[in-house]
Structure formats: C-alpha cells, structure tokens
Image: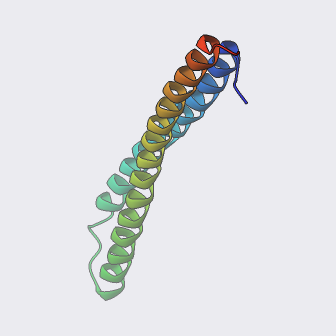
Amino acid sequence: MSLSQERIEIRFQEVKQIAQELRKEAVCMKKRLEKQRELFLAGRCYKGKSAEMLRRKEVELCTELEEEINRLLGLADKLMQQAEKMYLAEQRNYQISITRIYR
C-alpha cells in the first residue's frame, strides 16, 4: 500500500512532534534533577553515619535518574532518526509508484 504525499507528511510530522516532546520532557527532567542535586549538596553540612548513608543514597538516586533521562534522550534521537528514514523510504516508494508504467 502506497501512502499519498499528504499522508506521508502528516505521519512524519506526528512522529517528529512526539520525538520533540519526548526530548523536551527529558530536558526538563534533567534540569529538575540538577536542582535536586544542588539541594542534596546544600544539605552536606550534617555529619554522622546516618547523614553519610543518606548522602550515598541521594547520589545513587541522582545517578540512576540521570541514566534514565539520558536513555530517554537517546530514545528521542533514535525515534527521530527512524522517522526520517521512514519518511525518505516512503517518499521513494511514492515516487516509484507514480512513475510505474503498467502494460
């Protein structure tokens, strides 16, 4: 099934928009994580074994969240690349379909 030129454009724009929204959300999450990390570091004045354990847990949490955010950013990039590849493939298919000669 060949898609019309308009449908190709619409689908590509939809996927592109989703990828952009995903990237935007990941960037916002990263900014919030940085603010949270600053708050954790501001609370470093406490001393003691429990404060050290809490600090370690906070660092682990920030690291895990940052890894997840980076995965989301990678996923957004991959989605955009795939959308561009599919767009080009559909454009080629469309061009082939309109130039075919049937006998």
Task: Please identify the quadrant where the N terminus is shown.
Answer: top right
**Which is more toward the observer, 19 or 23?**
19
State the image quarter where residue 39 is shown: bottom left
Residue at coordinates 36% horizontally, 85% vertically from top-left? 50
Drawn side of residue 75 relative to residue 62, left or right: right
Question: Residue 23: x, y in percent?
Answer: 48, 38
Question: Residue 61: x, y in percent?
Answer: 42, 68
Residue at coordinates 50% horizontally, 41% vertically from top-left? 79
Residue 83 drawn above or below residue 4: below
Judged from this view, the residue extending furthest toward the front is 103
Residue 5 drawn above or below residue 70: above
* Tag count: 0
Question: Residue 63: x, y in percent?
Answer: 35, 65
Residue at coordinates 62% horizontally, 15% vertically from top-left? 100
**Which is more toward the observer, 35 or 70?**
70
**Which is more toward the observer, 24 or 77?**
77
State the image quarter where residue 67 is shown: bottom left
**Which is more toward the observer, 79 or 67?**
79
Question: Residue 54: x, y in percent?
Answer: 38, 77
Residue 75 drawn above or below residue 17: below
Judged from this view, the residue extending furthest toward the bottom is 49
Coloured how?
rainbow
Task: Please identify the quadrant where the C terminus is shown.
Answer: top right
